[in-house]
Image (cartoon, coloured by chain):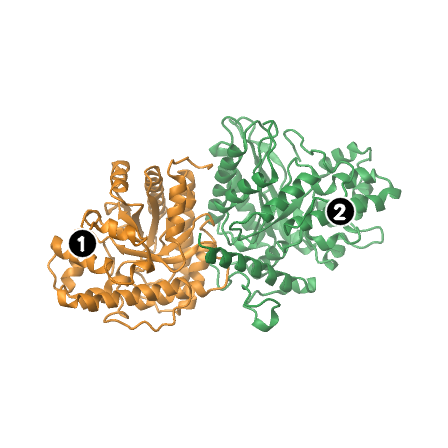
Chain colours: A orange, B green
Amino acid sequence: MSCFTSKFADELIANAAYIGTPGKGILAADESTGTIGKRLASINVENVESNRRALRELLFTTPGALPCLSGVILFEETLYQKSSNGTPFVDMLKSAGVLPGIKVDKGTVELAGTNGETTTQGLDGLGDRCKKYYEAGARFAKWRAVLKIGQNEPSELAIHENAYGLARYAVICQENGLVPIVEPEILVDGSHDIHKCAAVTERVLAACYKALSDHHVLLEGTLLKPNMVTPGSESAKVAPEVIAEHTVRALQRTVPAAVPAIVFLSGGQSEEEATRNLNAMNQLKTKKPWSLSFSFGRALQQSTLKTWGGKEENVKKAQEAFLVRCKANSEATLGIYKGDAKLGEGAAESLHVKDYKY
Amino acid sequence: MGRSLKLHICRCVRLQCGLLKAHFLPQFQTLHKIRSRHLPQSELSSPSPSPPPLLSRMSCFKSKFADELIANAAYIGTPGKGILAADESTGTIGKRFASINVENVESNRRALRELLFTTPGALQYISGIILFEETLYQKTSSGKLFVDVMKEAGVLPGIKVDKGTVELAGTNGETTTIGLDGLGDRCKKYYEAGARFAKWRAVLKIGNNEPSELAIHQNAYGLARYAVICQENGLVPIVEPEILVDGSHDIEKCAYVTERVLAACYKALSDHHVILEGTLLKPNMVTPGSDSGSKVKPEVIAEHTVRALQRTVPAAVPAVVFLSGGQSEEEATVNLNAINQLKGKKPWSLTFSYGRALQQSTLKAWGGKEENVEKAQKAFLARAKANSEATLGGYKGDAQLGEGASESLHVKDYKY
């Protein structure tokens, strides 16, 4: 390698490539305690450890779902939890060929002198935490940087800070055997059109890859988790093919071929929208030297949550809803989704929350 | 990576090449008017091909020449073709002539270029020729403009637009390239004369403390500024950040520096809103230094080179056209061939932009004498054909070696 030589290099490269296996993707189940509280509140479920555990068990034990997944991102608490029969979640995932991942950032703080722009924190002691997580079974990590589009946003400062924060996080992960997911989310909030989103996305991604290069990150052992390129939430919707075209072009202009896979975030898209857009991308005929897959949270769990409502007797039905979305997205990574997934309750519902805070 | 994914990628790349072959071989005149669109299935010779790059509205700066730039850049990367770098300045060609005892006068410079451009059967292997300004306005002995000879043969004329290098104060002999002043006007003029692409050579070296951050930054941003000015005026910019082969470093060091330099270049190009689909990259291959004492196999050079490109060059760039540096004619061909045989992700075509490595044995065979022209043209044809095969990974190493074809062309601290 001509970047820094991590003793984990081969493993990082193999794991990153595995996550991008066609037909598979990532379930983002890493909602922090505060965030999952909001979700549980929306279905009138108490935010206690046993309920959080029960929800994740519901997802991980859904018959037929794990083959559609290459990885699951967990919150720290979940990394150490077990199923009701005593099997640690990480073991359950591993034996099903699913890599456990771990959210390692500590949320955002505002950048002084900006119009509400933020940077992400969590670098202090990150190396030690990564070591610990690797020992507990994690093999990849996630760190969410957030940018927004406005009159003067994103500013050069916000782009630089977030890009270099991501790069520093990435190399620390690699030093400790975790594949870093690089996530520079540009929020969908705003009334801008798709061209503006494309221009900003290209600028942000170019900055990210410069930062990763400066920090000697091994690109073959990373993943990218970007937003799709779409109009702003307050602007008119466009067809999936248009989103696909603008998104893939932005990636062609910025993401080196060494990156094995791109795992899109769903932002505020509904379950069905997210699947259709991913499908359109995989159908697009053009240069795509990385696999294009999903790392969906809300867009995989929304109808499952609603169906469950916290009740034991609903688990089976809720698992059916989850399987439907897993399969649909698996097909979308192959460009063969026919739009025929049985829509669960809320599957077509927008999941956009203005100025979303995790 | 899963096998099905590998196949999918190979299929996309192969079909894109197939599309380019079917799309860009017809009349040259239409090239300037080509609007790349999704072609109806019936127009294409291969089943379910990949269409040209996504075009709709640009999110970079909006050049009125966008479609033309994209079409021309893609054409230059046509599999089986590459660039002849015949842009030696008057001073530089003088050195070449001196080596074969030929006087450096305009008629001799004209005669050499005529020899090359009228070689029967050679131009089919060439998608573009880089010219020095003087040559852009010269004619054959029968009075036909060189640019017209090229156009009729489906070859795009290119023009060197930089004005050489100057040293950066406070560095250890590092340089930056000059030529930005009035560049826009000069590009306009060259476009009117028939040029469709340009070249600007930035130079970096490897040493204990080199290349410095300053040298990388200056050269990258100079290239980016040059690139966008070209695009504003209808010329496809070749971005050339040459890292000299001089030095005793190993191939790993060269790889590391090349990756660092290319990453800086693409950041600069992004900052300057350059349309990547309308550019070409002309990098050095990744090799050990000339004084390292070690030679490595073509496959090793290929692996390190392609990996460096995978790590830095966005897929939007249609073609990478390697410089030959100090490599002999045969080395440059064999290495290019190995690069094209390598199995891996290569979302850009990989071809040549050779000067010395296409002309060395031709020059020797000519020696400035009219009676040697035919022999010299045969030598040139042999190299052009060999390199064409190399772009397809099909070179068998059997080109009849002209005198000097295996001779290293390395000149220490080479100045153009």
Q: Looking at the figure, which quarter contains the C terminus of chain A?
A: bottom left
Q: Relative to residue A240, is residue A176 depicted above or below? A: above
Q: Return the x and y of residue A170 as percentages of the image width and height.
A: 35, 42
Query: In which chain is the residue bearing label 1?
Result: A
The residue at which mark 1 appears reads as: A83
Q: Nearer the viewer, residue A192 or A89?
A: A89
The residue at which mark 2 appears reads as: B382
Q: Return the x and y of residue B402 as percentages of the image width and height.
A: 78, 40
Residue B50's image quarter?
Answer: bottom right
Tag 2–tag 1 contact (CB < 8 Å): no
Q: Helix, strand, or loop for circle 2?
A: helix
Residue A293 appears in the figure: yes
Closest to the camera, between mark 2 and mark 1, is 1
- Residue displayed at 60% across by 68% down: B44
Q: Relative to residue B303, is residue B391 depicted above or below? A: below
Q: Residues within 10 Å of mark 1 (few under 14, many from 20)?
A: some
Q: Return the x and y of residue B161 as percentages of the image width and height.
A: 63, 45
- Residue displayed at 79% across by 50% down: B119
Residue A124 appears left or right of B182: left
Callout 1, which amino acid?
Ser
- Residue displayed at 38% across by 65% down: A331
Q: Nearer the viewer, residue B223 or A170?
A: A170
